[in-house]
Amino acid sequence: EAGVAQSPRYKIIEKRQSVAFWCNPISGHATLYWYQQILGQGPKLLIQFQNNGVVDDSQLPKDRFSAERLKGVDSTLKIQPAKLEDSAVYLCASLKRENTEAFFGQGTRLTVV
Amino acid sequence: GQQLNQSPQSMFIQEGEDVSMNCTSSSIFNTWLWYKQDPGEGPVLLIALYKAGELTSNGRLTAQFGITRKDSFLNISASIPSDVGIYFCAGQEGMDSSYKLIFGSGTRLLVRP
Protein backbone atom coordinates (compact mmCIF):
# COMPACT_ATOMS: atom_id res chain seq x y z
CA GLU A 1 0.00 0.00 0.00
CA ALA A 2 1.43 3.36 -1.05
CA GLY A 3 1.92 5.94 1.68
CA VAL A 4 0.99 9.60 1.82
CA ALA A 5 2.76 11.49 -0.95
CA GLN A 6 3.74 15.15 -0.65
CA SER A 7 5.51 17.53 -2.98
CA PRO A 8 7.70 19.41 -3.21
CA ARG A 9 10.07 18.22 -0.46
CA TYR A 10 11.74 21.62 -0.17
CA LYS A 11 10.83 25.15 -1.18
CA ILE A 12 12.59 28.45 -0.70
CA ILE A 13 10.70 31.65 -1.49
CA GLU A 14 10.95 35.31 -0.73
CA LYS A 15 8.49 36.95 1.62
CA ARG A 16 5.31 38.18 -0.05
CA GLN A 17 5.57 35.46 -2.72
CA SER A 18 3.02 32.70 -2.99
CA VAL A 19 3.58 28.95 -2.66
CA ALA A 20 1.51 25.79 -2.98
CA PHE A 21 1.94 22.32 -1.53
CA TRP A 22 0.36 19.14 -2.78
CA CYS A 23 -0.73 16.02 -0.93
CA ASN A 24 -2.00 12.66 -2.17
CA PRO A 25 -3.39 10.64 0.75
CA ILE A 26 -3.53 6.88 1.08
CA SER A 27 -6.20 5.47 -1.20
CA GLY A 28 -9.54 5.14 0.55
CA HIS A 29 -8.67 7.47 3.42
CA ALA A 30 -11.55 9.87 3.93
CA THR A 31 -9.91 12.22 6.42
CA LEU A 32 -6.99 14.44 5.43
CA TYR A 33 -5.07 16.78 7.73
CA TRP A 34 -2.60 19.57 7.06
CA TYR A 35 -0.20 20.40 9.87
CA GLN A 36 2.41 23.11 10.34
CA GLN A 37 5.50 22.10 12.29
CA ILE A 38 7.84 24.88 13.36
CA LEU A 39 11.35 23.78 14.29
CA GLY A 40 11.45 22.34 17.80
CA GLN A 41 7.69 22.10 18.17
CA GLY A 42 5.00 19.51 17.70
CA PRO A 43 2.77 19.55 14.62
CA LYS A 44 -0.04 22.12 14.79
CA LEU A 45 -3.27 21.35 12.98
CA LEU A 46 -4.13 23.84 10.23
CA ILE A 47 -7.08 22.23 8.52
CA GLN A 48 -8.95 18.93 8.46
CA PHE A 49 -11.01 17.56 5.57
CA GLN A 50 -13.56 14.77 5.62
CA ASN A 51 -13.83 13.69 1.98
CA ASN A 52 -14.00 17.05 0.18
CA GLY A 53 -15.59 19.00 3.02
CA VAL A 54 -13.79 21.11 5.64
CA VAL A 55 -14.33 19.77 9.16
CA ASP A 56 -12.04 22.11 11.09
CA ASP A 57 -10.10 25.14 9.89
CA SER A 58 -10.16 27.09 13.12
CA GLN A 59 -6.36 27.33 13.25
CA LEU A 60 -5.87 28.26 9.60
CA PRO A 61 -4.74 31.90 9.06
CA LYS A 62 -7.39 32.50 6.45
CA ASP A 63 -6.09 35.90 5.41
CA ARG A 64 -3.11 34.19 3.74
CA PHE A 65 -3.64 30.42 3.84
CA SER A 66 -6.13 28.46 1.78
CA ALA A 67 -6.66 24.77 1.15
CA GLU A 68 -8.88 22.63 -0.98
CA ARG A 69 -9.54 18.96 -1.52
CA LEU A 70 -11.29 18.55 -4.81
CA LYS A 71 -13.08 15.25 -5.40
CA GLY A 72 -12.15 14.13 -1.90
CA VAL A 73 -8.73 12.81 -2.87
CA ASP A 74 -5.71 15.09 -3.48
CA SER A 75 -5.34 18.31 -1.56
CA THR A 76 -3.42 21.55 -2.01
CA LEU A 77 -2.41 24.07 0.62
CA LYS A 78 -1.55 27.58 -0.53
CA ILE A 79 0.10 30.52 1.17
CA GLN A 80 -0.28 33.97 -0.36
CA PRO A 81 1.53 36.16 0.54
CA ALA A 82 4.15 34.33 2.58
CA LYS A 83 5.69 35.80 5.72
CA LEU A 84 9.00 34.97 7.38
CA GLU A 85 7.16 33.23 10.25
CA ASP A 86 5.63 30.76 7.78
CA SER A 87 9.00 29.00 7.58
CA ALA A 88 8.20 25.50 8.78
CA VAL A 89 7.59 21.94 7.69
CA TYR A 90 4.09 21.37 6.29
CA LEU A 91 2.87 17.87 6.93
CA CYS A 92 -0.05 16.06 5.38
CA ALA A 93 -1.66 13.06 7.06
CA SER A 94 -4.58 10.81 6.22
CA LEU A 95 -6.92 8.63 8.20
CA LYS A 96 -9.28 5.92 7.01
CA ARG A 97 -11.96 6.40 9.67
CA GLU A 98 -12.36 7.18 13.34
CA ASN A 99 -10.19 5.25 15.79
CA THR A 100 -7.68 4.15 13.22
CA GLU A 101 -4.09 5.15 12.65
CA ALA A 102 -3.17 8.43 10.95
CA PHE A 103 -0.25 8.19 8.51
CA PHE A 104 2.00 11.07 7.55
CA GLY A 105 3.84 12.11 4.43
CA GLN A 106 7.48 13.22 4.51
CA GLY A 107 6.50 16.86 4.61
CA THR A 108 7.46 19.97 2.68
CA ARG A 109 10.12 22.15 4.27
CA LEU A 110 9.37 25.80 3.49
CA THR A 111 11.94 28.52 3.99
CA VAL A 112 10.80 32.11 3.57
CA VAL A 113 13.64 34.61 3.17
CA GLY B 1 -7.62 25.13 22.14
CA GLN B 2 -6.83 21.68 23.43
CA GLN B 3 -3.33 21.02 24.66
CA LEU B 4 -1.28 17.96 25.37
CA ASN B 5 1.45 18.22 27.97
CA GLN B 6 4.30 15.90 27.05
CA SER B 7 7.25 15.23 29.33
CA PRO B 8 10.10 15.15 29.61
CA GLN B 9 11.10 17.64 26.95
CA SER B 10 14.39 15.85 26.36
CA MET B 11 16.36 12.87 27.65
CA PHE B 12 20.01 11.95 27.31
CA ILE B 13 20.57 8.36 28.34
CA GLN B 14 23.12 5.59 28.16
CA GLU B 15 22.63 2.80 25.64
CA GLY B 16 20.86 -0.11 27.32
CA GLU B 17 18.83 2.03 29.71
CA ASP B 18 15.05 2.08 29.77
CA VAL B 19 13.15 5.24 28.87
CA SER B 20 9.73 6.48 29.91
CA MET B 21 7.76 9.45 28.63
CA ASN B 22 4.17 10.52 29.09
CA CYS B 23 1.41 12.80 27.94
CA THR B 24 -1.48 14.33 29.81
CA SER B 25 -4.50 16.19 28.56
CA SER B 26 -7.26 18.30 29.99
CA SER B 27 -9.70 16.51 27.70
CA ILE B 28 -10.75 12.94 27.08
CA PHE B 29 -9.46 11.18 23.98
CA ASN B 30 -10.80 8.15 22.14
CA THR B 31 -7.43 7.17 20.73
CA TRP B 32 -3.82 7.73 21.71
CA LEU B 33 -1.07 7.44 19.13
CA TRP B 34 2.70 7.51 19.59
CA TYR B 35 4.96 8.65 16.75
CA LYS B 36 8.70 8.94 16.18
CA GLN B 37 10.15 11.61 13.94
CA ASP B 38 13.65 11.54 12.50
CA PRO B 39 15.26 14.72 11.13
CA GLY B 40 13.84 15.73 7.76
CA GLU B 41 11.12 13.11 7.85
CA GLY B 42 7.44 12.96 8.72
CA PRO B 43 6.27 11.30 11.94
CA VAL B 44 6.13 7.50 11.79
CA LEU B 45 3.50 5.67 13.81
CA LEU B 46 4.86 3.42 16.57
CA ILE B 47 1.86 2.36 18.61
CA ALA B 48 -1.90 3.01 18.55
CA LEU B 49 -4.15 2.65 21.61
CA TYR B 50 -7.93 2.51 21.37
CA LYS B 51 -9.33 1.58 24.80
CA ALA B 52 -8.90 2.98 28.28
CA GLY B 53 -6.47 0.81 30.22
CA GLU B 54 -5.11 -0.82 27.07
CA LEU B 55 -1.48 -1.88 27.24
CA THR B 56 0.21 -2.53 23.88
CA SER B 57 3.72 -3.59 22.94
CA ASN B 58 5.69 -3.27 19.73
CA GLY B 59 9.08 -4.90 20.17
CA ARG B 60 10.94 -2.95 22.85
CA LEU B 61 8.18 -0.34 22.99
CA THR B 62 5.25 -0.49 25.38
CA ALA B 63 2.48 2.06 25.65
CA GLN B 64 -0.62 2.39 27.79
CA PHE B 65 -3.90 4.26 27.43
CA GLY B 66 -4.70 5.78 30.83
CA ILE B 67 -7.85 4.73 32.68
CA THR B 68 -9.10 8.31 32.80
CA ARG B 69 -8.57 8.59 29.01
CA LYS B 70 -6.62 11.77 29.68
CA ASP B 71 -3.11 10.36 29.69
CA SER B 72 -0.77 7.88 28.07
CA PHE B 73 2.80 6.74 28.52
CA LEU B 74 5.44 5.19 26.28
CA ASN B 75 8.29 3.03 27.55
CA ILE B 76 11.34 1.99 25.56
CA SER B 77 13.35 -0.84 27.03
CA ALA B 78 17.07 -1.48 26.49
CA SER B 79 17.58 1.61 24.35
CA ILE B 80 19.88 1.48 21.32
CA PRO B 81 21.46 4.30 19.27
CA SER B 82 18.81 4.09 16.54
CA ASP B 83 16.17 5.06 19.12
CA VAL B 84 17.49 8.61 18.82
CA GLY B 85 14.79 10.98 17.57
CA ILE B 86 11.79 12.98 18.69
CA TYR B 87 8.81 11.11 20.10
CA PHE B 88 5.34 12.63 19.89
CA CYS B 89 2.12 11.62 21.53
CA ALA B 90 -1.12 12.43 19.76
CA GLY B 91 -4.66 12.24 21.00
CA GLN B 92 -7.66 11.80 18.81
CA GLU B 93 -11.19 12.73 19.67
CA GLY B 94 -14.06 11.71 17.47
CA MET B 95 -17.34 13.50 17.65
CA ASP B 96 -19.66 14.27 14.79
CA SER B 97 -17.08 13.08 12.26
CA SER B 98 -14.49 15.53 13.60
CA TYR B 99 -11.56 13.21 14.27
CA LYS B 100 -9.25 15.97 15.40
CA LEU B 101 -5.69 14.78 16.04
CA ILE B 102 -3.78 16.88 18.58
CA PHE B 103 -0.03 16.53 19.16
CA GLY B 104 2.18 16.98 22.17
CA SER B 105 5.31 19.09 22.04
CA GLY B 106 7.63 16.09 21.74
CA THR B 107 10.34 14.34 23.74
CA ARG B 108 13.82 14.51 22.22
CA LEU B 109 15.75 11.33 22.97
CA LEU B 110 19.52 11.12 22.72
CA VAL B 111 21.30 7.81 23.37
CA ARG B 112 24.94 7.68 24.36
CA PRO B 113 26.69 4.56 22.99
Image (tube, rainbow, N blue to C red):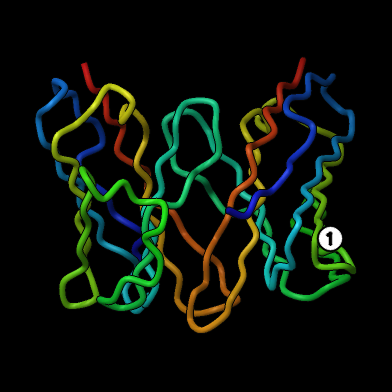
Residue B47 in the image: above or below residue B86: below
Residue A12 is left or right of residue B27, and the answer is left
Disc 1 is placed on an element classified as strand
Residue A59 is situated, as x and y percent measured from the top left of the image, at 41, 51
Give me the chain letter of mark 1: B
Within 10 angstroms of label 1, few (less than 14), some, or many (20 or more) residues? many
Q: Give whichever of A96, B18 is nearer the camera.
A: A96
Q: Is residue B71 above or below residue A113?
A: below
Residue ranking furthest to the front: A63
Q: How many marks?
A: 1
Q: Is residue B38 left or right of residue B5?
A: left
Given the current orientation, which residue lies at the most extreme bottom position? B96
Question: Along the horizontal axis of the image, is A32 left or right of A101?
Answer: left
Is residue B60 in view from this perspective? no
- Tell me the residue at 15%/44% (across/down): A20
Image quadrant holding the N terminus of chain A, namely: bottom left
Q: Which image quadrant for residue A42?
A: top right
Residue A39 appears in the picture as rendered: yes
Task: Work out whether residue B100 or residue B106 is closer to the camera in this orientation and state it.
Answer: B100
Relative to A109, residue B77 above or below:
below
| Quarter of the view holding residue A90 | top left
Q: Residue B109, how many percent across, how many down?
A: 71, 27
Residue B32, percent from left and from top: 69, 62
Which x, y percent locates residue B103?
59, 49
Q: Assign the C terminus of chain A to one quadrant of the image.
A: top left
Quadrant position of residue A98 = bottom right
The residue beneath circle 1 is B64
Where B104 falls versus A72 (above or below)?
above
Q: Amino acid at mark 1?
A: Gln
| A31 or A14, nearer to the observer | A14
Q: Residue at x 74, y 57 (%)?
A: B58
